[in-house]
Amino acid sequence: MITIGLTTWTDHPAFSNTDRPPTLPQYASFLPTVEVDTPFYAIPRISSVENWQKQVPSQFQFILKANRLMTQHDLKSPSIVSLAERWRAFDSFKNMIQPLVDTQQLKTVLFQFPPFFEVSRENLDYLIELPKRLPGVLITVEFRHPSWYQKPFINHLYAGLKQLHITLAIVDEPHNLNDGIPFVPVLTNPDLAFIRLHGRNAEGWFNQGPDWRKKRTLYRYNDHELAGLAGIIADLATRANEVCIIFNNNSGKDAAPNALKLQSLLGLHFTGLAPKQLDLF
């Protein structure tokens, strides 16, 4: 099975038939899954999660980003939390996702680690702890420090993640020898291959000026690039129960058009979507 989604549901005017941002039901009439980053900043109330569920079909699934305390983003901030507080964040997060777990609407929890989270014994031990803290939950990790991909360690990483049943995110982003993460379509969990497409805007990615966050994902994949990705995705789909592709190249609102084009190239027809909404007034 191959699924395609985007980051958030409000930033994609292609899915709205008005001048307003699309609603979750409008988004769910086009694609079967969405990545939600709000839990990274603050863990939502259970009632908020239940409200999401009411707006989508029963087959629709959510990808939730792990909270910033769970990914240790606080370690480079003035307010570092204690280990006990970190584990409490896991407990709160686990309670929050339970409605999605109960209805099988949680695809995966994405741990996008900070750029300073590099290879170390301490960080390896932390990865081992993740499945214990979220038992029964499919976990995906995305690294942003190139040390995880250095030889010969990378082969040990693949083996370790396979043993932990953790999915390694396959990321497409600008990279060079000393910075960025390479595109490595390796399967570490047969249940899920997870691809995140950030775009290939090297100038915007590496030049961290004042408007860097607005420019780093300013990129539209061309048809040739999407066709190349489609071939890799089709191959992964022969070895994984599901391949999920998330487009994050949305600084210029390119994610939705790219997603729909890739869907066409792969010949996918998603079922169980919300009905298309007509705005008559």
Image: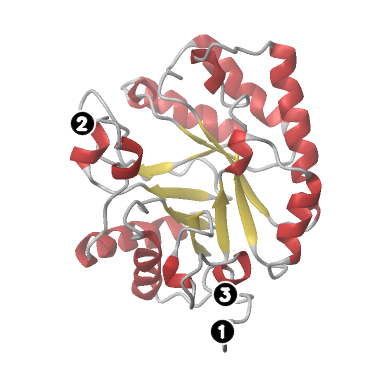
Q: Which residue is mark 3?
A: 29
Nearer to us: label 2 or label 3 = 3
In the rendered structure, which amino acid carries the disc numbered 2? Answer: Asn
The image's mark for residue 176 is 2
Q: CA distance from mark 3 to mark 1?
A: 14 Å
Q: Residue at x 30, y 36 (%)?
A: 212
Left/right placement of residue 91 relative to residue 163 reads right
Q: Residue at x 37, y 24 (%)?
A: 145
Where disc 2 sits, the SS reads loop
Where disc 3 sits, the SS reads loop
Q: Residue at x 54, y 18 (%)?
A: 124
Where disc 1 sits, the SS reads loop
Q: Nearer the viewer, residue 181 or 220?
A: 220
Q: Position of residue 62 (x, y in %)?
A: 63, 54
Q: Nearer the viewer, residue 109 or 149?
A: 109
Q: CA distance from mark 1 to mark 2?
A: 47 Å
Nearer to us: label 1 or label 2 = 1
Q: CA distance from mark 2 to mark 3?
A: 38 Å
